[in-house]
Amino acid sequence: MMFNRFFKFSQDKLNYLYSNSLFLQNIDWFILPFILLTFVASTFMNSDAIGFFALIVMFLTFVKMLTKPDEKFEFKNFEIWLVAYFMIVVISLFGSTLFSLSLKGFFKTFVYIGYYFSLVQYLKNNKDKTLWILTTVGVCVGYEVIVGFLQSFLHLDAISTWQDTSNLNPEDVISRVYGTLKPLNPNLFGGYLVCGFPVILGSVFYLLNKKYFKSAIVALGLTFLSVYTIFQTGCRGAYLAMMLVFASAFILSAKFFWNSYKKIYITLISSVTALFIFAVTFVSALRHRFLSIFAMRNDSSNSFRFNVYHSSLEMFRDNWLLGIGVGNKNFREIYGLYMKTGFDALSAYNIYLETAVESGIFALIAFLGFLISLSIQAVKFILTAENKDQIIFVSISIISIWAVMFHGLVDTIYFRPQLQFLFWTFVAIISTELKGFNNKNLVRDGNE
């Protein structure tokens, strides 16, 4: 591989420098804080500040690749799809009629994917830090859950037109919470909570497996609190994604926890299911909000999305090969030529349609190939591996990815940095855990 030959050449030339530099020999200890700061910054800083920490991670990783002996890139099957997607985005960039605007969107894509490969390189030799990363994510998500919970009692005023209240009684209108994420928006907040929720839920299983029962009870309480807060976001896409999280967790965990923790397992699943049914059935504000999913054109938010979908499909038909160029600024400029009067939009409100519009049909195929290949390998690992810690880590990660992708059917908050960095972190964890894995040589629990 050309890049690896370049890094090998550089490593040989800079070997003396590496051998005499404590900084270079311990560079991973400098990379880790900036990885963790990326998650912390996501809870209260703007996009530029979050990206700054990610860029530092990328820069330090590049320095490590140039100097540390035997560092090289190794691609898995699903990563080949990802590289293909990125190359198609590059081609789309140069084919865009709005190159300068598209270049800004491309740079964001470059940072996200560069951050992913940087994290893979870090975790490759620091698998023990996976727990540190997931713990930090869990603390950040838990903090936002508590903030949202407290906001739910403050009866916040809507910052924008977040729901159609024309056919609702005042008491049936949800006071939608939005946490501290920038920009303040309940849909972004709901998407972030759903993306991080599997970490909270997975911590219950992890702590039970380690027999930390008191801590598991605390994690279980935070799980119920998370469900409540997600409800209070009023984000209908998050409602559906949360249902997917529970269904996926139930299916993937049954094999491993049924025999040992059957009563606890049944109690947990039954309680969460009962809570969801009770909330939707007896809390009128939630019932109206949930049922509005199926109101079709009778709900103004739904109707708006249908109009955007129609216009976006027209954009795709006219630019199906290379797309219009990546980026929401680019999208908005071109969308103005297709939109219905009074229905301006920042995105296609569907990440798959957005990908097709921005970078063309082949980018969409590559992106779907990446997701499908990743999912197949992750599920195969979960069903055949025996180390429960690794199984839990991979399960948390793939369920989070599925939740984001499912939510992405009706929204595009996936493209916000708060979700992007979480998303690629989960992909990196899966990539790391799959390293060296095959069906004939399974990793076993250390105490076996």
Image (cartoon, rainbow, N blue to C red):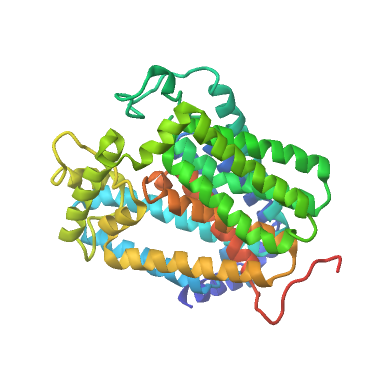
- Between 346 and 241, the one nearer to me in the picture: 241
How many numbered tags mark residues here? 0
- Between 266 and 416, the one nearer to me in the picture: 266
- In the figure, residue 288 lies in which quadrant? top left
| Residue 90 visible to the viewer | yes
Task: Pick out the residue farthest to the right.
Answer: 447
Percent position of residue 6, x then y: 50, 73
| Residue 43 visible to the viewer | no
Q: The C terminus appears in which quarter of the rendering?
A: bottom right
Task: Pick out the residue farthest to the front.
Answer: 281
Residue at the (21%, 61%) spot, across then down: 95
Residue at the (27%, 55%) spot, across then down: 358
Residue at the (82%, 44%) spot, across then down: 213
Figure check: 361 above or below 189: below
Residue at the (52%, 38%) spot, across then down: 42
- Between 400 and 78, the one nearer to me in the picture: 400
Percent position of residue 269, x then y: 65, 48
Percent position of residue 96, x then y: 21, 57
Task: Answer with left or right where residue 233 lies relative to residue 399.
Answer: left
Task: Answer with left or right where residue 395 lies relative to residue 92.
Answer: right
Percent position of residue 193, x then y: 54, 40
Task: Answer with left or right where residue 13 lies relative to residue 159.
Answer: right
Task: Pick out the residue farthest to the bottom.
Answer: 440
Figure check: 28 above or below 333: below
- Between 62 and 276, the one nearer to me in the picture: 276
Figure check: 365 above or below 403: below
